[in-house]
Amino acid sequence: MKTVLLVFLLLPTCRLNAGDINAKIRGMAAAAGMKNASWGLSVKDAATGKTVVERNPQLNLVPASIMKVFVTAAALEKLGPEGTFATRLYYDGAISDGFLNGNIYIKGGGDPSLGSRLISGAVPIEEVFKGWTAAIRAGGINVINGAVVADETAFESVQPGSWAWEDIGNYYAAPPSALTVNDGLYTLYLKPSAEVGGDAVVLRTEPYIDDLRFENHIKTGPAGSGDNSYIYAFPGQYQAVLRGFIPQGGPEFAIKGALPDTALFAAQSFGYYLTKAGINANKKPRKGTAPAGLKLLAETVSVPLRNIVRVANKHSFNLYAELLLRQLGGGSPEAGLAAVRSYLAANGVEVSELELSDACGLSTRDTAKAASFTDLLRAVSKKKYFPDFYDSLVSPGDPEASGHLRNMGKGTALEKNLRSKSGSLAGVRSYTGYLKTKKGRTLVFTSIVNNYSLPGASLDSMHETLLLELYNSR
């Protein structure tokens, strides 16, 4: 079987008919590490809808992160590429001689870009705080006889219960909050041991987080072994457990964790900023619900939705997908999933067996058919927002992208003709997107593989070869 795989990978690109491609796909499916896997494949002509090639296109499979194309496309249609979200600063009580006898409220509107370091055009959180501080001064407030209060009640800020325990506490499983800042994450710096197997030492976090403590069990692996560490902590928990390995070499190594409570962190951070600016609050920052009758001090509007979608897809950023889902559902994740299902059905996708547990694909309870993704992407190709959606997908060698997909097809004919989104979980690899062929046709494709046992890089190579053959043959 290894010989079959090797032959497939070394095949030259050439003109193929459908029979040739089907034969190659049968060989791919019979290869070592694939023969006992479940594989759904669907390739269609974007213009006509005609099937080019398929294998088990109706098989229900765990799709991983290609789930994000469902919610990002739905958001572009329902909210518009120019759609924005607002975070508002209010106060209650009365102002007298520079004293506010009340609280300052930060009311979140579910803006993923607030203080983001990833999204183009997002204003750094220090600049946001600077503007809010100026608004407080302009309102005649010099002292706050109250607290800075974070209000995240616009959303149900809970994580899906089906996410794996080992993921919770890591940045890619950050809890979605209507008041999200700093991309919901912090960076933890550790010092590797000089010896393989030695203890790594916790150095610091950036930014600093009040009361966050670590029970550290991280060891040092060989140089070049990469990040094999995990942060274990439930949302709202400030005692985190560190396990795994970081590579030897270098004075420090950085890993990323999920902020335990991003809304509270926002209130604390702004409270500290105000103190440095000479405006003191005599009560500790906290979370709470803003009462009626507040007075508006400032409004911070997000970047356009297209900028958020671009990072959600190119970086496969789970938090953004979950926040957009709640936008679609008026704050409720359940209503958001229902809105996504309705959107898919309205665009010709069969949803009777579709199982949606989250927006980002981190849950293994999500199941979908390869044909569902292909059918949706074909429908999106005819929408006004298609250019924004298309540009949010990854091209070979894409400098904006992260992950394994950015190198697939680099240096080949795919480089200027492929846009795709990938997904990966343990035993799951998926790909969906658009391919412009040598003859100028646009193909829409989806491939989902579950329970494979060959290396993920080999699966990438096999799909690169398949896409190159489709490029040359159509």
Image (spheres, rainbow, N blue to C red):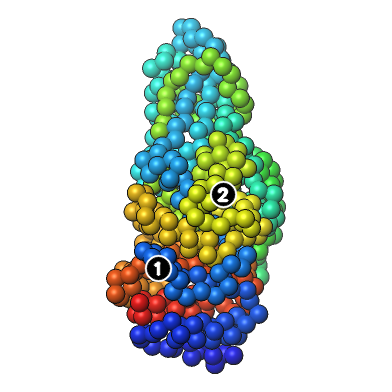
Residue 342 can be seen in this image:
yes
Q: Residue at x 38, y 65 (%)?
A: 48
Task: Give the residue at mark 1.
Answer: 45
The crowding category of the residue bearing disc 2, from other C-alpha atoms within 10 Å (few below 14, some 14 to 19, many at least 20), is many
Query: Is 296 placed left or right of 330 in the picture?
Result: left
User: Does 339 sit above or below residue 191?
Assistant: above
Q: Residue at x 40, y 62 (%)?
A: 394
Q: Residue at x 52, y 76 (%)?
A: 459
Give whichever of 381, 150 is nearer the camera. Answer: 381
Label 2 close to label 1 by CB (< 8 Å): no
What's the amino acid at mark 1? Asp
Q: Residue at x 40, y 42 (%)?
A: 80
- Tell me the distance, in whole angstroms, between the alpha carbons under discs 2 and 1: 24 Å
Q: Quadrant of residue 35?
A: bottom right
Give whichever of 404, 103 is nearer the camera. Answer: 404
Task: Give the residue at mark 2.
Answer: 341
Q: Secondary structure at mark 2?
A: helix
Query: Is 297 placed left or right of 102 in the picture?
Result: left
Label disc, if present, on residue 248 of the rendered structure: none
